[in-house]
Amino acid sequence: MDERSLKKRLNRVTIVVILISILILAGGSVASYYLRAMLEDTLDAQMESEAEQYKINISRKIDGDFQTLHTLSSFLRHSQMSTENFLHAFNDSRQYNQFIRLGYFPKDGTGTRVTREAGIETGISLDDVDGNLRAVVENAWAGESGLSRIYELSDGSGSIYFYGVPVYTADGTVGALVAGVSTDSLAGILEDRSILTGRGYIHLISDTGRILVRAEDRVVEEELASIYEHGYIGPEEQQHIRKALEKGDVCRSEFTYMDETYRVFLEPMEVNGWYLFCVQTARSVNAGIYQLMVSTRIITVAVLLLIMAIILYGYRMIYQTNRRLIRSAWYDPLTGAYNMPRFEMEAARIIERTPEYSLAGLNVRQFKFINEIFGSRQADLLLRHIKDVVMSHIREGEVFCRSTDDMFFILLKDTDRDMIRARLVQMMEEISRHAVSNNRNYQIMLYCGVVIGTDVNDVRPSVQKSLTHVRFALATARQSLKNSIWFYDTALHEDEKLENYVESHMHQALEGEEFRMYLQPKADLETGQVCGAEALVRWIPSAGKMIYPGQFIPIFEKNGFCVNLDMYMVEKVCRQLRSWIDGGIKPVPLSVNQSKLLFYEADYTDRLKALLDRYKIPAELVTLEILEGLAMENIGELNEKILKLKEIGFQISLDDFGTGYSSLNTLASLRIDELKFDRGFLAAIREESGGWRQAIIMKQIIKIAKKLSIRTVTEGVETKENEELIRRLGCECAQGYYYSRPVSAQEFTETYMK
Ligand code: C2E
Ligand code: CA
Ligand code: CA
């Protein structure tokens, strides 16, 4: 999994969590909405049925009042009592009935009435009474019973309404009996505390919205003459109510007062245009429930948010740890560049698709030196700088990494050599501008090995193969001081093929005796006689051309196979000496090359001794050639080994003298028998300028060697002049093509030993 897919996965989880939360919230909201609607519906229904009940109560009262008045009317007609006496009797019994006023208006004369305030009055003209009352009287004269509108009494003693019934004789209607009822009696009914089980109140209003009887138990504090006053009922609702009232329909509505909304129900009384105006205070009464519902909702949201936060936080944590894991798995912790596994993965995608790429390896010369001299902090800074520079030169679709130490690999999309070279040179120049430890004098040098995909036409190109090619080109670039960018080409390809062959065939070659001993004679410069020979290995594969040591010894030194080969060569040397001795030929001492690794093997001396014993060879006949480079490391240990070997009787020769950096001091302290000047010495002396200095040095070394009883041999003697030169310098022995190339043991025996 990489960072991208991790992010994708996290996003998916986040979306799912959000969706689930939204779903829960929506579900909750819908449920709570329905619950609320249900509650309201129930309350509305309750209000309506109760309103109906009150309507019935009021109608009953009105019917009752009419009944009473009718009874009084027939009593008045049938009894012999005068109207005045009748009213007196009524006045006396008033506390038993609800009529506060009673009057009789004959069609042909003035009326008589009884009021609480004035008692019985007679001679009342119809013109003097309130218009509402007059209408009732006139209706009754016309033979119709009726109710007046509610109106305020002029003396301010409250509001009143009148019933009117006709009074008949056999001739028809003769007058009207009217009775006034205080609205308080209606209020008594409406004031009932059990209205809507205490969760509402009812006003009596007219169809114009005028409030006729206002319940004491109400929410609106202000004095109101009409329900429309103060605009507690919104304009739209007012419109809606007005329309219904005009038609005499029932109507549902609501109004808001002090931030509370109240449900309203208007029930027509079907009398006088009266309406019951029912207000439900359930919501405020039920405020607790509503509050609970609201707080439940808030709590649900809060809990959901919390859960969401926790889940997201958890995922963030997982994301970050995963990211850290991915980072450590795919990135180089020092520079932040891709590491090798990641690079291989990314490069594989490109390489396996198209050969249109080039792969470069970039390395710093002397990085170890920078690390040791300037410190690891400076070295790290340099590596980060390299990463920055490479990063800034990389284009879309190209990748790079730091594999180990100072090794960077860059995959470019270019396939043109000049283009690649230009880009790499630019990078190298920019990297070189970095000052190590503010030291502008230290010049950072780099080298590159490059393989171009289109150059190798592999059947199955792979990152691994390309990397091997690059490493090969890099190794070549490292050796070349002039050319810091080396392209992998056919020649390198051959080298690489050979290296592969060497590594994969060395064991079977050793078994199959493909390694042959060649001998190169050493000449005694005083006598001109062959005074010995050096054993040099040749690899002659059963099929194919001879392979020279230069092509495989370095590889064997790297992979450790040298140890086996050298022992094998020592045995070959012993066998050769044995065969000469057995053949009655006086043997010459043979030299054999010993690699560094072998020299440090624990049982090295024992194994050598065992070989001498097996072939019964006097140790003096074998000269072990060790490399000058060995003396650089641990002189004490080396000398110990040398002494051990000398104890057995071996001759020790210091090979390739002059290529290392040993001083005369080391020379003096090493207990060697022979010194072999590298052929570089001769080459240096032959040079026009400064050659004489080299000669002087060589002459002095020979002088010292002589004093230390060390024999001197010069390698690479190719001409008569060479020979004369070294003779003049005092050298004792010579080896080189001038005398002979290395030849097979058989040829050597035939040429020199007979
Ligand atoms: P070396 O030990 O310095 O051996 C001398 C090399 O110089 C030989 O190369 C020889 O052929 C070459 N040579 C001799 N005379 C002349 C001359 O006049 N001019 C020039 N230009 N070269 C001359 P060779 O046989 O190719 O061996 C190369 C190196 O491989 C040897 O250098 C030695 O270091 C190593 N080597 C050879 N055989 C063995 C072996 O059995 N074991 C080990 N460890 N190394 C070996
Ligand atoms: Ca040698
Ligand atoms: Ca040599």
Image (cartoon, grey):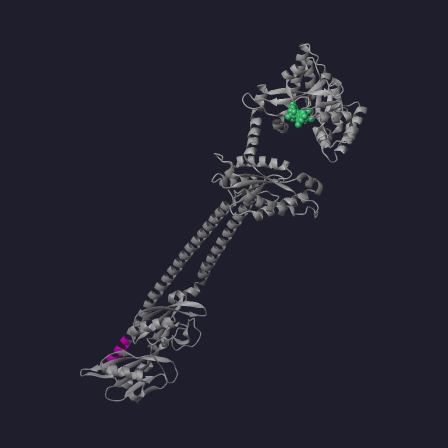
Can residue 692 be found in the magenta stretch? Answer: no
- Left or right placement of residue 320 versus residue 84 in this view: right
Q: Quick check: 439 above or below 517? A: below
Image-quadrant location for residue 638: top right
The region drawn magenta spans 66-75
Residue at x 72%, y 20% (from the top left corner) = 523
Q: Position of residue 330 (x, y in %)?
A: 55, 42
Q: Position of residue 405 (x, y in %)?
A: 63, 39
- Left or right placement of residue 391 versus residue 696 in this view: left
Image-quadrant location for residue 368: top right
Residue at x 33%, y 73% (from the top left corner) = 242
546 or 582, nearer to the observer: 546
- Residue 670 shows up from this direction: no
- Left or right placement of residue 255 versus residue 105 in this view: right
Q: How many marks?
A: 0
Q: Quick check: 67 above or below 327? A: below
527 or 314, nearer to the observer: 527
